[in-house]
Amino acid sequence: MNNILSNLGLCRKAGFLINGFDAVIKEALDASSKLAGILVSCDISDKTLKELKFKSKNAEIIKLSVTKDDIGRVMGKNIAVIGITDEGFYKKFKAYL
């Protein structure tokens, strides 16, 4: 869990994060998107996850083992949906599964 949160912090500082459901969906629907993948908290609602999968058909979604509150401690606000725009960081998150 600490590795996930520390990498989220690094990714945020590097500018490779898109925060929040609406912003991630907008990026996923953009034809010129650089979205590598989407991360979601373990306590995301089923309805939100279903809508996310429907609207971002081409993006891979990883469900993390951290809660919105855990992410909030790193990001400064509780966030359930995060888009990653760097392939290297996204591969690190995939490795944690």
Image (spheres, rainbow, N blue to C red):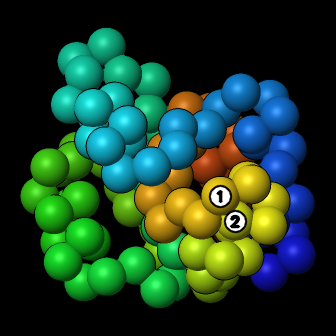
Label 2–label 1 contact, CB within 8 A: yes
- On the image, numbered disc 1 is attached to which residue? 77
- The answer to whether residue 24 is seen in the rendering is yes
What's the residue at 52%, 44% (across, down)?
A: 19
- The answer to whether residue 64 is seen in the rendering is no
Residue 31 vs residue 76, the one in the foreground: 76
Residue 82 vs residue 57, the one in the foreground: 82
Element class at badge 2: helix
> How many numbered marks appear?
2
Q: Is residue 9 rendered to the left or right of residue 29? A: right
- On the image, numbered disc 2 is attached to which residue? 72
Q: What residue type is labelled 1?
A: Lys
Residue 5 x/y as whole percent: 80, 66
Quarter of the figure with the N terminus: bottom right
Q: What residue type is labelled 2?
A: Gly
Element class at badge 1: loop
Question: Is 61 placed above or below 9 here?
Answer: below
Question: Is 78 placed above or below 13 here?
Answer: below
